[in-house]
């Protein structure tokens, strides 16, 4: 037998194996359900028993139907399942015959692939690249509309225009206008860029092609470019349609010019191919390329020229109103307890992206399920928020009394500084229950989203951060490592105050920024400065921190009794919320007044 015949035989056997294996699977396996479906069943308490093996969960629901699902993180679900008193059995992830065959499959397929590949090479040409392009499969119905995307009112008109031009291409061209070829959505991760692209396709009912920028770039030079060409041939046939390229910066980063290493070379060829193709097609072909990035600053300017990605929409993190709208969209799927104020939830999560809000709603529902509640309450959102941003409460760890006292005074120091200084955000919650890495926390909640910060606000922020360490020093007269994060935060604010916001008289309003990357405005230019200036900057930062530190010490000393009162309250209750904190404050003020009256009384005897 020649080598090719042997190859064919192996391929045939592999094929038969795969087919019979799939038939076997279909006959013996229970209903496969998605992770989301599994979670829904779990939340609805419709699962009676589960069997765990590796990442696989098999089990029965209340109607005695069998199901199978794959769960990314089983340990995290165990407590919930225990709480719901589901009968759980488990098994070691053992090797049986099927398991062995399954694990052999990739090996077999690689062998098959290798044979085809080597055969092609013998034929003298490699059609490897175009073979892989078959993966461009459009979704005909994304099922997503603008209803599903909330809080993007500014971009809405522009998006509706695009939808309109896809629906009625003739209307636009008769007016002499042209359909946009490229739309660049720029914004931080999780702000709904993918969702918007899907919604445009859904609203216009056109096919939706989706891929990541890095999908184009492979090890082999030339593959990316040929993929781009294939993509355009394919999509032009299906026009009108939407092509979504996520993380365009993977191919559209600035071209280096010069030191082209292997992978850079490939990236540039891919980018060039994309530019050529975008210039090449007529705009009446109605293929709209929507690209997304969170690094617009590193994009090649050639991409942004007219006729290419000439429409650019910035999708920013939602403000309080936007967050409320997104919450409204996502809470449609869950049962909310009466009187749950979503606007309060929205207010308490500044900086959350759409994706994080979706996650928050899901976590809140889980929290409620864990407690066997019928509906999700405000407190569940609170808990979910803290879990997401700080890690789960570790109620069971034993903290020795000395550390508890230290933490109580540390947190009290933060909270009291925040309360006594003007121009600060109200304290929302203080707690000495360990969470994630932290031993305690003090949360402040801004009343509105702030867009600008005054110098006083920033200076007071530094003082609040120093408050923890200051309290430790006053009461215990020593320093601990517990304040390292606070010190980091304080130094960062002081640095930006000096180098970025020009708020230091010593240095003046000159920007000395470092290249930090990240999304927009984080400073990507760097003003070169001399050793001498660097030293002055360092000194200025140091003196700001020192001043804040000593002023905070004075403030806490003057209000020493307040500090003790709050720390005691924390040691007893572990958590003190905003209202309770106000009560402690009132008590303190009253006592102080009484004391002062008494003092005055003593001063002037009859
Ligand atoms: P990006 O592409 O910007 O990283 P995605 O579009 O992938 O973000 O968003 C992830 C998920 O977050 C979405 O599937 C959706 O559930 C939620 N989400 C994000 N933004 C919004 C929004 N504006 N309205 C509703 N849901 C949103
Ligand atoms: Zn602290």
Image (tube, grey):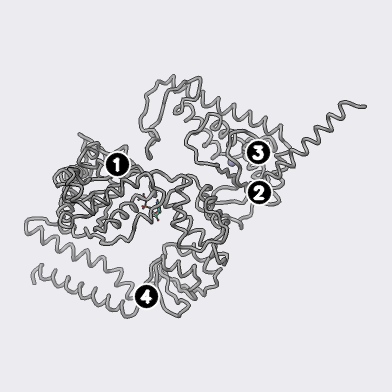
- Residue at figure coordinates x 30%, y 52% from the top left: 197
Q: Position of residue 505 (x, y in %)?
A: 51, 20
Between residues 524 and 293, which one lies in front from this camera angle? 293
Task: Between label 1 and label 4, give the one nearer the viewer.
Answer: 1
Query: In the rendered image, which residue does mark 2 sit on?
Result: 576
Label 2: how many Cα within 10 Å (few below 14, some 14–19, many 20+): many
Disc 3 and disc 1: Cα gap in Å?
46 Å
Q: Position of residue 379 (x, y in %)?
A: 58, 56
Using the image, determine if residue 18 lies above or below residue 310: below
Between residues 299 and 266, which one lies in front from this camera angle? 299
Using the image, determine if residue 373 lies above or below residue 193: below
Q: Position of residue 44 (x, y in %)?
A: 49, 70
Query: In the rendered image, which residue does mark 1 sit on?
Result: 312
User: Which label belongs to residue 416?
Assistant: 3
Task: Between label 1 and label 2, give the one nearer the viewer.
Answer: 1
Give the quarter of the figure containing the N terminus: bottom left
Q: Quadrant of residue 398 in the image?
A: bottom right
C-beta proximity under 8 Å, tags 4 and 2: no
Ligand 2's image quarter is: top right
Looking at the rendered structure, the secondary structure element under dot 3 is: helix
Disc 4 and disc 3: Cα gap in Å?
57 Å
User: Which label belongs to residue 31?
Assistant: 4
Looking at the rendered structure, the secondary structure element under dot 1 is: strand
């Amino acid at each position: 037998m020649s080598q090719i015949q042997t190859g064919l035989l192996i391929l045939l056997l592999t094929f038969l194996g795969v087919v019979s294996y799939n038939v076997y699977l279909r006959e013996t396996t229970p209903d496969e359900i998605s992770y989301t479906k599994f979670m829904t069943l779990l939340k609805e308490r419709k699962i009676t028993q589960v069997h765990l093996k590796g990442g696989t969960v098999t089990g029965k629901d209340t109607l005695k139907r069998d199901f199978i699902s794959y769960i990314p993180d089983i340990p995290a679900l165990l407590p919930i399942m225990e709480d719901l008193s589901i009968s759980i059995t488990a098994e070691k992830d053992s090797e049986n015959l099927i398991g062995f065959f399954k694990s052999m499959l990739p090996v077999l397929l690689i062998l098959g692939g290798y044979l085809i590949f080597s055969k092609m090479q013998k034929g003298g040409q490699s059609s490897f690249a175009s073979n892989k392009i078959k993966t461009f499969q459009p979704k005909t119905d994304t099922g997503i509309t603008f209803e599903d995307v909330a809080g993007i009112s500014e971009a809405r008109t522009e998006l509706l225009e695009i939808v309109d031009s896809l629906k009625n291409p003739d209307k636009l061209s008769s007016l002499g206008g042209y359909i946009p070829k490229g739309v660049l959505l720029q914004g931080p991760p999780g702000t709904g860029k993918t969702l918007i692209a899907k919604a445009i396709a859904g609203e216009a009912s056109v096919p939706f092609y989706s891929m990541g920028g890095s999908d184009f770039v492979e090890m082999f030079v030339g593959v990316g470019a040929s993929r781009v060409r294939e993509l355009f041939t394919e999509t032009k046939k299906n026009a009108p349609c939407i092509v979504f390229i996520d993380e365009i910066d993977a191919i559209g980063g600035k071209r280096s010019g010069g030191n082209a290493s292997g992978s850079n070379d490939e990236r540039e060829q891919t980018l060039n191919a994309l530019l050529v193709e975008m210039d090449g097609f007529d705009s009446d072909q109605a293929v709209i390329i929507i690209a997304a990035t969170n690094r617009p600053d590193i994009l090649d300017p050639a991409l942004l020229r007219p006729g290419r990605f000439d429409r650019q929409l910035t999708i920013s993190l939602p403000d309080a109103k936007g967050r409320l709208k997104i919450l409204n969209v996502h809470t449609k799927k869950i049962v909310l307890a009466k009187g749950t104020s979503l606007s309060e939830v929205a207010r308490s999560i500044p900086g959350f992206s759409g994706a994080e809000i979706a996650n928050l709603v899901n976590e809140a529902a889980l929290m409620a399920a864990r407690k066997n509640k019928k509906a999700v309450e405000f407190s569940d959102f609170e808990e979910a928020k803290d879990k997401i941003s700080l890690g789960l409460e570790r109620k069971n760890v034993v903290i020795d009394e000395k550390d508890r006292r230290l933490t109580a005074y540390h947190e009290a120091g933060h909270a009291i500084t925040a309360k006594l200084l003007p121009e600060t955000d109200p304290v929302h919650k203080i707690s000495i229950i360990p969470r994630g890495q932290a031993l305690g926390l003090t949360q402040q909640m801004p009343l509105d989203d702030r867009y600008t910060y005054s110098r006083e606000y920033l200076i007071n922020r530094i003082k609040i951060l120093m408050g923890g360490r200051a309290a430790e020093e006053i009461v215990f007269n020593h320093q601990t490592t517990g304040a390292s994060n606070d010190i980091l935060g304080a130094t960062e604010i002081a640095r930006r105050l000096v180098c970025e916001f020009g708020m230091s008289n010593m240095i003046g309003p000159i920007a000395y920024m470092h290249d930090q990357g990240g999304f927009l405005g984080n400073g990507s230019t760097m003003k070169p400065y001399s050793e001498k200036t660097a030293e002055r900057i360092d000194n200025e930062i140091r003196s700001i921190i020192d001043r804040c530190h000593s002023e905070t010490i004075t403030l806490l000393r003057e209000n020493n009794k307040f500090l003790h009162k709050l720390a005691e309250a924390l040691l007893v209750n572990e958590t003190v919320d905003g209202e309770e904190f106000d009560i402690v404050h009132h008590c303190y003020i009253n006592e102080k007044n009484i004391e002062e009256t008494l003092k005055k009384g003593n001063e002037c005897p009859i």
